[in-house]
Image (spheres, grey):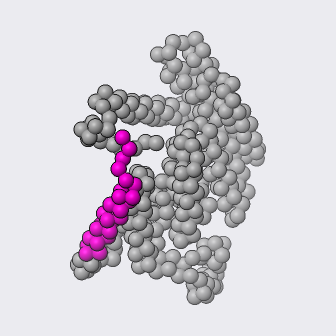
Amino acid sequence: MHVVADTETLVADGIITTPQAAEIEARSRQTMVTLGINTILCLGILSATGGLIFWLQDALAVAICGGLAFVLGLAILKRGSATLLMFGNAAALIGAGMLTGGGALELAHNHETIAGPVMAGAGFVLFAAAAAGFARGLLPARFVIGAVCVLGLALHLGGLGFLLDRHEIAGLTVSLFFLYAALLIGGTGWLLDVRLISALAIVPFAQVLDTGTFYLHAVYAFYSPEPTLSILQMSALIAAGLWVAATHEERLARHARIVTVMAFVVANLCALVGSLWGDVVGQTIWGPERPGTWTSDDWEAYQTALDAFRETALNIPEGVFSIVWAAALVAIALRAAHRNNRGLFNTAVVFGVIHAYTQMFESFGDKPLAYVIGGLVLIPVAWGMWRFDQLLRERAGPAPD
């Protein structure tokens, strides 16, 4: 487990020796350096692959260049020295990316009728073969095989998404597709032991209830049409992630923790939406359906049905969201601190600041008494957290020699 520790204090207290502290610091630094190198390498590969595909803009040219790059990369990996392995990995992955990405674009633009089934089928075969080879250790170039597995997964899910969009399929089928995508992405992240991939599973999982983002000029926006249900959805995932992290081995636990943090982030964003606008629970799911055409009669009928639904539906005001959200952040921050869960603790603190900043301008900007009450409430809360921590330390007893 990765923890935060002050090595100088540990040495001063006699817990560890100076050489042990130096070894811990060296390994921590090496982990960060390796993470930085891999991040830069992956960004370079993605940028070069996409740039070459759109620069060449010809299926045959992309296929030829991609094939040559892939063969060159494999040759370097097989015959090159250890210092050249990074270039071999990069060349092989750029070639594989050009072949799959270029093929997908060619199918989508010039063969729309067969693009979806071909991409979904070919992607699944590529994904399954690479995943089996990676899991069994049959092939030596594990970095390349793992990346090919991800490319196959992207091609498979992209093909299914293309099919749904082309046939204008909506509703439950789309939600099941997003759930399927989340399970596949999360499973792939665990198989390859890459937490970044596991973290990406939260994107389709959130879209099961249509929670997501969109972009306007100079504006990135988050939307959640069902904040209450989305919070419950993310809460279930958080509970499952915490249980897995506490009961399984570290290899699986670290993926469960990153998914838990991502679910907590999305839940907080949904709570932010609810604290600003409130929520009529279920309005976009089992409420009246928006008409396809917006004539005056359609609009009046829709508004009448919507008003009737809101009268009987569960309506949660924004003030309730604000209070419950604040209390939940304090409770989760306290628990995360005692459980040494830095991800949840840092996220709770960040969204606590966001919550306070938002409410300062949206609700209490002209009400100074609210700050007085809020500050006086937080002081005994902090005292209670301090006393609770003392009791836990007393029950735990002295540290073993």
Residue 268, image x, y percentages: 45, 63
| Numbered marks: total | 0
Residue 10, image x, y percentages: 29, 39
Of the 4 image quadrants, the one containing the C terminus is top left
Looking at the image, residue 374 sits to the left or right of residue 88; the answer is left
Q: Does the magenta stretch include residue 386?
A: yes
Q: Is residue 72 visible?
A: no
Residue drawn at (46%, 72%) of the image: 274
Q: In which quarter of the image is residue 338?
A: bottom left
Please name the predominant secondary structure of the magenta segment in the image: helix
Residue drawn at (69%, 58%) of the image: 176
Residue drawn at (36%, 32%) of the image: 24
Q: Is residue 222 magenta?
A: no
- In front here: 174 or 371? 371
Residue 26, image x, y percentages: 35, 29
Residue drawn at (46%, 68%) of the image: 271
- In front here: 110 or 190? 190
Residue 117, image x, y percentages: 76, 45
Magenta-drawn segment: 374-401
Looking at the image, residue 264 sits to the left or right of residue 364; the answer is right
Q: Can residue 265 be seen in this view?
A: yes
Q: In which quarter of the image is residue 207?
A: bottom right
- In front here: 221 or 106? 221
In this view, 229 is above or below 54? below
In this view, 117 is above or below 27? below
- In front here: 64 or 195? 195
Q: Quadrant of residue 110?
A: top right
